[in-house]
Amino acid sequence: MHASEDGYGLWLLAAVNAAFFIFFAWSFYKPLTRWDWRGFGMFSAFIVALFAEMYGFPLTLYVLGGWLSANYPQVNWLSHDAGHLFEMWFGWRANPHFGPFHVASLFLIGGGFWLLSASWPVLYRAQREGRIAREGVYARMRHPQYVAFVLVLTGFLLQWPTLLTLASYPVLVWAYARLARREEKDCLSRFGNDYVSYMQEIPAFIPRRRRALAPSAGGTR
């Protein structure tokens, strides 16, 4: 494959894009605890794997090339645009960057980064003051940062699915849920009944309708 013809083999571009999104996420997330670094490390590994295939070597297209060519002979599977697999499978013949899955992915990625940016200042203030973060997005869900990472990963998965990212995605979602539970154990030991009350009022990941909360002392994600 020739990079000038198909858009692959561009390892510098892959590295620059991966570094950009990892740094962009770090600038909002700023991991502090061991749980923070584990969650951020898993996100970073997913991003590196994604861009390695998007601009480096299209492993997924090579592995599935025979099946794809036999079932979708009208598609040039050696072209860079073919990496937008969902657009190709569902017959989107215009520019894949304007396809429904790509557009949906932009909303998910943007929403995820917005959620990261909205949650970090609230958590940081709560940690400095030694209390439970209950305002802002933390008044709607207990773990907005993990929800944000899943939104971003889902967006990239819709935009450019690969065998590696498809395989790692459910593992990452499970790992984020497990990290959230471990964090809650730490918070329960630190804040006791205050955190129990917070858990009873606020869902972990999927927000309910907003309702007034009683003021309480106590900080977590």
Image: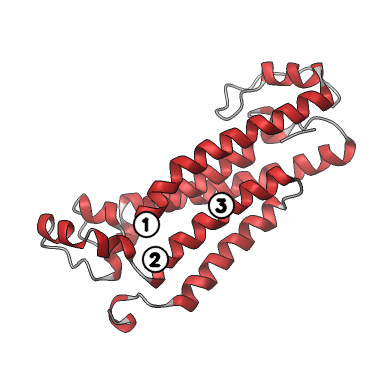
- Where residue 114 sits in the image (x, y, percent)? 60, 48
- What residue does disc 2 label? 54
Residues under labels 1 and 3: Cα distance? 16 Å
C-alpha separation, residue under disc 2 versus residue under disc 1: 7 Å
Q: Residues within 10 Å of mark 3 (few under 14, many from 20)?
A: many
- The residue carrying mark 1 is 160
Amino acid type assigned to the residue bearing label 1 in the image: Trp
Which corner quadrant holds the C terminus? top right
Q: Is residue 164 left or right of residue 138?
A: left
Quadrant housing the N terminus: bottom left
Q: Amino acid at mark 3?
A: Phe
Image x and y of residue 69, in percent: 14, 61
| Amino acid type for the residue under numbered disc 2 | Met
Label 1 or label 3, whichever lies nearer to me, is: 3
Residue at 75%, 34% (x, y): give it.
Answer: 220
Residue 194 occupies quadrant: top right
* Picture coordinates of residue 147, whole percent (x, y): 57, 38
Instruction: Say if mark 2 contacts mark 3, CB within 8 Å.
Output: no
Disc 3 designates what residue?
43
Labelled pair 2, 1 in contact (Cβ < 8 Å): yes
Asked if 197 appears above or below 175 in the picture, the reply is above
Depth check, front residue: 133 or 45: 45
Crowd class of label 2 (few under 14; some 14 to 19; many from 20; radius 10 Å): many
Horizontally, is 155 left or right of 163 in the view?
A: right
Name the N-terminal-most of marks 1 and 3. Answer: 3
Which mark is on residue 113? Answer: none
Closer to the N terminus: mark 2 or mark 1?
2
Query: Residue 188 falls in which quadrant of the image?
Result: top right
